[in-house]
Amino acid sequence: MKSIYQQRNPYEWQQFIDLLKQAVNENKTEDLLAMLLTADERNTLGLRVQIVSALLDNQAPQREIQQQLNTSAATITRGSNMLKTVDPTIRDWVSEKLNGKA
């Protein structure tokens, strides 16, 4: 699996992924994420999902997405740039899950 997360110790990211998989298998995902993430971090992740969904939906210009989601142009641009670097297979999968289309 290709890791796009850059950090000092890749083991830390893999440890998180493994723990998240276990939480999903044991129906403890929400509890785990509530413990690990602050309310602000959870809000940021929710916003990122909305940004990715809107960008993949491709129905509105970035400026309009920015205004609808009440966020900065830089945040939308970061999301757009990230989508350009990911494997098309995962991008299409996420698009299908979020917007019902690939």
Image (tube, rainbow, N blue to C red):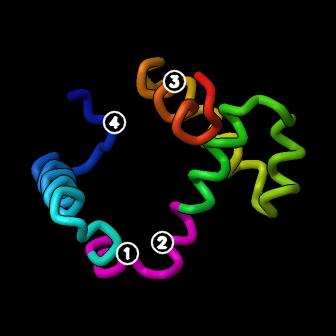
Are dots 2 and 1 in contact, CB under 8 Å?
Answer: yes
Q: Which residue is mark 2?
A: 41
Mark 3 or mark 2: which is in front? 3
For residue 81, which quarter of the picture? top right
User: What amino acid type should be assigned to the residue bearing mark 1?
Assistant: Leu
Q: Is residue 35 left or right of residue 70?
A: left
Label 1 environment density (alpha carbons within 10 Å; few <14, some 14–19, many ≥20): few
Q: Which residue is mark 3?
A: 92
Report the magenta stretch's main SS. helix
Alpha-carbon span between mark 4 and mark 3: 17 Å
Q: Secondary structure at mark 3?
A: helix
Q: Which residue is mark 1?
A: 37
> If you read the primary sequence from the N terminus, does the residue marked by circle 1 or circle 4 appear first?
4
For residue 33, which quarter of the picture? bottom left
Give the residue drawn at x 85%, y 56%.
68
Which one is nearer the viewer's eye here, 23 or 5? 23
Q: Secondary structure at mark 1?
A: loop
Q: Which residue is mark 4?
A: 4
Q: Residue furthest top?
A: 88
Alpha-carbon span between mark 1 and mark 3: 27 Å
Mark 4 or mark 3: which is in front? 3
